[in-house]
Amino acid sequence: MRPVLGIESSCDETAAAVLDEEGHVLADSIASQERAHAPYGGVVPEIAARAHLALLPDLVRGVMGRAGLRFGELGGVAASAGPGLIGGLIVGSQLAKGIALAHRVPFVAVNHLEAHALTARLPGLVAGGAPFPYLLLLISGGHCQCVAVHGVGRHERLGGTVDDAAGEAFDKVAKLLGLGWPGGPALERLAASGDPGRYAFPRPMMGRPGCDFSFSGLKTAVAVDVARRGDGALPLAVAADIAAGFQRAVAEVLADRAAHAMALMRQRAADARLLVVAGGVAANTTVRAALAKAAEAAGFGLVAPPVRLCTDNAVMVAWAGMERLRLGLTEGLGFAPRPRWGLEELTRTHTDPRHPSESQDSRRTGPGSRRHDPAPDDSSGRGSATSAGGQPG
Ligand code: KG4
Ligand code: ZN
């Protein structure tokens, strides 16, 4: 398999990367739009789309130059085609399709959530790449879900948030504490000097059967606590204690829900041994430590990719493209980006009898037959934290 170019533009990170067949990164570039959106306290879809349009062509030329490749030498061009903010998805997908058309290489429409899910299969992360099946805990600004990953295109959602995503809760509480956006990293820094036992915040869903999450009550509890202290700025020590207490509550809830998810996963697949975390919140040290403890207690290994691969990036898109290309799962140029595109829709597509599931582990089976199925109409997924209609992930 020749190298694959990956393009990420589903939310506020503009990124391009080139990977070889073994998953070695030949070139990788990422431009964060954080500064452009920060004054608005969240991602502004129109600003994001324009920034992708301005940044992507140079980013793509740059990674191709550093990889020492011409477009015609690629094995395929993969772009995040959903879920996400539609403007950015269109920019990235159209660029990928243009390259594919002009240079006669396959186009791969990558589901952004599947890209997060398959990151653990990068051979450099776990020796030889994480084998299927494994449990994915995706905790980002737009998503919070537990997914049984059985194979490429074969995902089963075990549970998810009924309201806010974990990262959204971090961002909202950070705002209440007067921190900038995005709030997660700033809140973690503040929490480092706080006492996590000083204020008792609720642990929503803790101990409940299943592995659903809820964070809006926790955020409201913090809001009530902050409001009762009056209008003035919070003393730094108080803000730090609140941040630490909130962070501990989130970490404990995530660990509890992950423990339930691991038990469910074992029922689905007795040979499942790995808990993989992805999404920006997986960058949080307290969260990682709590998940490591839960995984150990359940007899699971924890795969926590380096932060740059947990947050949005193009390496994961190129890798998901590579996995799909090996199975012959390319798309026609008529594939339309989807602001909402749940992982389980991929499952429905890929349990197609023409593509039996037992051929899913590409490294064992090699390339499969090429297919160009129109994917089903999309309707699943929750609304975005940052804009109507999309699901930044
Ligand atoms: O996966 P991601 O980069 O992208 C989207 O959700 O689009 O995740 C970003 C989210 C934000 O909500 C951010 O506040 C949160 O991840 N986050 C963190 C940390 N770093 C990023 N939350 C807690 N602790 C962190 N260190
Ligand atoms: Zn994402």
Image: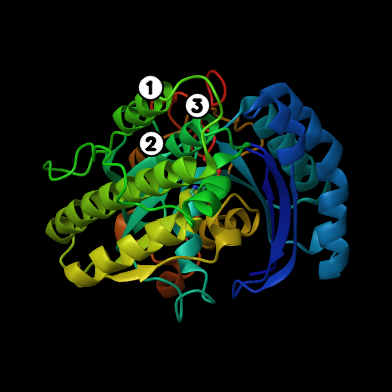
Q: Amino acid at mark 2?
A: Glu
Across and down, in percent, residue 386 comes to 56, 26
- Residue named by callout 1: 228
Can residue 165 be spotted in the picture?
yes
Side (left or right) of 271 relative to 383: left
Q: Residues within 10 Å of mark 3 (few under 14, many from 20)?
A: many
Q: Say above or below: 300 vs 55.
A: below
Which residue bears the numbered disc 3?
384
- First along the sequence among labels 3 and 2: 2
The disc, 2 or 1, on the residue closer to the chain's N-terminal end is 1
Instruction: Give the x, y percent position of residue 31.
Output: 76, 48
Q: Quadrant of the N terminus?
A: bottom right
Q: Are marks 1 and 3 in contact (CB under 8 Å)?
A: no
x 44%, y 25%: residue: 378
How far apart, in angstroms, are the residues tagged by discs 2 and 1?
45 Å
Element assignment for label 2: helix
Helix, strand or loop for disc 3: loop
- Mark 3 or mark 2: which is in front? 3
Q: Amino acid at mark 3?
A: Ser
